[in-house]
Image (cartoon, rainbow, N blue to C red):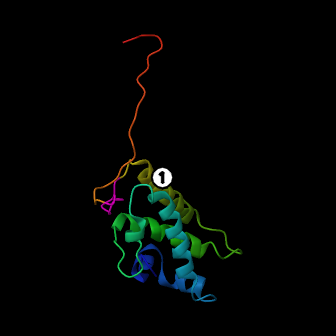
Amino acid sequence: MIYITQDDLKTESFERFITESTSDFPTVIDKAEEKSIGIAKTLLKGRYDVVLIFDETTPVRDEFLVEIITKLTTCKIFGRNAARKLPTDLKDDYDWAMKQLEKINAGRLVLDLPLITSSSGAPTSDTIWGNNTNKNFYI
């Protein structure tokens, strides 16, 4: 596991459920976490240094991001069982995690993570511009 730990998964669900859902395929947790990290990277890469954050040897952990990736990972683990319908609370957790990632992407939530830096080491940001045209000349 790269970013989350087994204890993070246990706080989200019972160990027995995790074991039952992953016993047939031992690397399913790692694969589910990789997919969840991929989703997070896609939505974080415009603002944060995702290479540094998700480094395999020394990842930069943020508890809010750990919570998001844990929820995405557990949903993927339990969703593997086609015979059993995914519980609504897990679906709600998945939806919550995706909404939080979208808020982070939009800049409405700011995490304590390394930002993208330029070659000089200064944080880079998108150009901010606006349009103040007033076609009707109202004040």
Asked if residue 93 is positioned above or below residue 102 in the image, the reply reads below
Q: Residue at x 59, y 66 (%)?
A: 87
Residue 58 rendering spot, x and y as whole percentages: 35, 79
* Three-letter code for the amino acid on which mark 1 is drawn: Glu
Q: Is residue 23 magenta?
A: no
Residue located farthest toward the top when viewing the structure as drawn: 137
- 12 vs 42: above or below: below
Query: Measured from the top left, where is residue 134 in percent x and y?
Result: 44, 16
- Return the residue nearer the eye: 51 or 107: 51
Split into 4 quadrants, where in the image is the C terminus?
top left
Along the horizontal axis of the image, is 112 left or right of 13? left
Q: What x and y, as percent, mark residue 64?
A: 36, 64
Crowd band around label 1 with a 10 angstrom C-alpha radius: few (<14), some (14–19), many (20+) = some
Magenta span: helix, strand or loop, mainly?
loop
- Residues in magenta? 110-119
User: At 42% from the left edge and 10% from the top edge, which residue is drawn?
Assistant: 137
Q: Is residue 80 above or below residue 134?
A: below
Magenta segment includes 111: yes
- Residue 42 in the figure: left or right of residue 116: right
Residue receiving disc 1: 102
Element at badge 1? helix
